[in-house]
Image: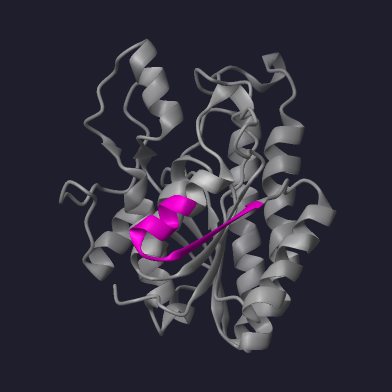
Amino acid sequence: MGTLGGKVAVVTGATRGAGLAIARVLGEQGATVYVTGRTTRGGRAPDGMPGSVEDAAEAVSQAGGVGIGVRCDHTVEADIQALFARVRREQGGLDLLVNNAWGGYEGAASGLPMEPFWTLPSSWDGMFVAGVRAAFDSSRHAAPLLVERGRGLIVNTIAWAHGEYLRHLYYDVAKSALARMAYGMAWELRPHGVAAVALAPGWMRTERVMAAHDAAPFNLDATESPAYLGRAVAALVADTDVLRWSGQLLTAGDLAREYGFTDVDGRQPEPFRIPAGV
């Protein structure tokens, strides 16, 4: 996957889960990573989950990179503006934005209910304000830094199962919107040498998933570590021909076979599919 020394990245929603894993893998490759989230040390995370921006920054630095923790609520435009103004001031540019901040799981500690949409309480704000709009606004403020550098990458992390319905209407529509957003951004950024993709992991053993497993054990054979997604991001940003992927919906499993990386256990899990009978 090469080295990312000298590369500057922003990973949103990086206090735990996929975002933390992506940031740590980028650190292993030598990148400078701004990790964002709403939780700082001494504060309480939504749903009581562990992690803080300071912890995430330390994890990046301990892995070999330079970690910089920034408290940022990606539903607040002033926070986003301040974040990218700081990146410009301190680094002079940007090579990678990973849109991973996602408010759609809050209040759903046991998972999203697979029920008819007309019976569900509204989760519009979590899915579309703290999810889709957060990615759009972050991309809007990051794009000038990427365009000025004449290269770079935006990654929208999404859920995807080979086009199958994700069994929760708000979730399905929001994640589809992020994929379409990447397609549109790619079209407009290509003349400036900047790529944009949507990237889907499989079923990850995040803190939230493992907490659910601890409460009611289930088979983990089909799962993968969050680092698998991180290695996919690192491979993309190290690829000097990353524009060949621009606008596409990619999976960690397919990219593992393309670039030759594995999960932490040496396996190459297949792209995620919804299990039969679910």
Residue at (62, 87) in percent of width and height = 149
Q: Farthest residue toward the right?
A: 78
- Is 64 magenta? The answer is yes
Residue 200 visible in the displayed image: no
- Tell me the magenta residue range: 58-70
Image height check: is 103 above or below 191?
Answer: above
Q: Farthest residue toward the left?
A: 266
Image height check: is 7 above or below 226?
Answer: below
Image spot of residue 48 (x, y percent) = 57, 23
Image spot of residue 30 (x, y percent) = 38, 71
Side of 245 where 153 appears, left or right: right
Residue at (35, 69) in percent of width and height = 29
Side of 55 where 255 appears, left or right: left
Image spot of residue 152 (x, y percent) = 55, 78
Residue at (42, 51) in percent of width and height = 59
- The quadrant of the image that shows the N terminus is bottom left
- The quadrant of the image that shows the C terminus is top left
- Is 68 magenta? The answer is yes
Image spot of residue 124 (x, y percent) = 75, 33
Foreground pick, 17 / 118:
17
